[in-house]
Image (cartoon, rainbow, N blue to C red):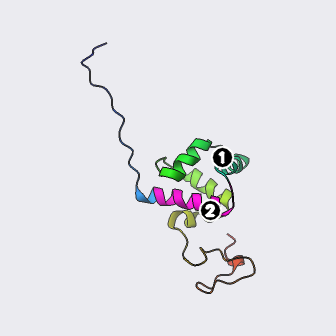
């Protein structure tokens, strides 16, 4: 081998802010259910979308792992949140678009049954 040949360097990982926000919303939805990363992995596997524990962790922490549309829909299905909520986040900053059962949010006036989607 030629010792003078240039070495290949890994390209720096660039995380765009939108991907990072989606990853944070997935993490928030997981934590609001009291789930561990492993529980989320098992739930994803149950719906036919096997995913590695490390991939979920990488996505949640850094947002650096690219996510397919299929993965986005699978996360939304397992976490029981609308896909748009993962993409753009909650509208109401008071109840996080999810008031407790039997209550109406005094800020956005949403009832829990209106969120079932």
Residue 100 at what x, y percent from top left? 70, 76
User: Around disc 1, counting alpha carbons within 10 Å, would you say few (fewer than 14), some (14 to 19), or many (20 or more)?
Assistant: some
Residue 9 magenta: no
As drawn, 93 above or below 40: below
* Residue at the spot 50% in from the left edge and 67% down from the top edge: 88
Question: Which residue is the site of mark 1?
Answer: 49
Res. 101 mark: none
- Residue at screen point 60% across, 56% down: 73
Can residue 68 be spotted in the picture?
no
Across and down, in percent, residue 4 comes to 24, 18
| 81, above or below 110, in the image | above
Q: Is residue 17 visible?
A: yes
Earlier in the chain: of badge 1 and badge 2, it is 2
The quadrant of the rendering that contains the N terminus is top left
Residue 112 position within the rendered picture, expressed as x and y whole percent measured from the top left: 70, 77
Determine the residue located farthest toward the top in the rendered image.
1
For this orientation, the residue located farthest to the right is: 102
Give, as a single range, the part of the protein colored magenta: 20-35
| On screen, residue 63 above or below 4 | below
Magenta region, main secondary structure: helix
- Residue at label 2? 29
Which element is circle 1 on? loop
| 3D distance between C-alphas at marks 1 and 2 | 18 Å
Residue situated in front as seen by the camera: 74 or 93: 93
């Amino acid at each position: 081998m030629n010792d003078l040949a240039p070495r290949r360097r890994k390209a720096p990982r660039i995380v765009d802010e939108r991907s990072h926000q989606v990853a944070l919303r997935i993490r928030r939805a997981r934590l609001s259910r009291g789930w561990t990363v492993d529980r989320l992995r098992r739930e994803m596997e149950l719906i036919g979308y096997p995913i590695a524990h490390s991939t979920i962790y990488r996505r949640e922490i850094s947002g650096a792992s690219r996510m397919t549309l299929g993965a986005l829909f699978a996360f939304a299905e397992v976490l029981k949140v609308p896909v748009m909520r993962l993409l753009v986040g909650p509208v109401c900053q008071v109840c996080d678009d999810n008031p407790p059962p039997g209550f109406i949010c005094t800020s956005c006036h949403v009832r829990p049954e209106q969120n079932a989607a």
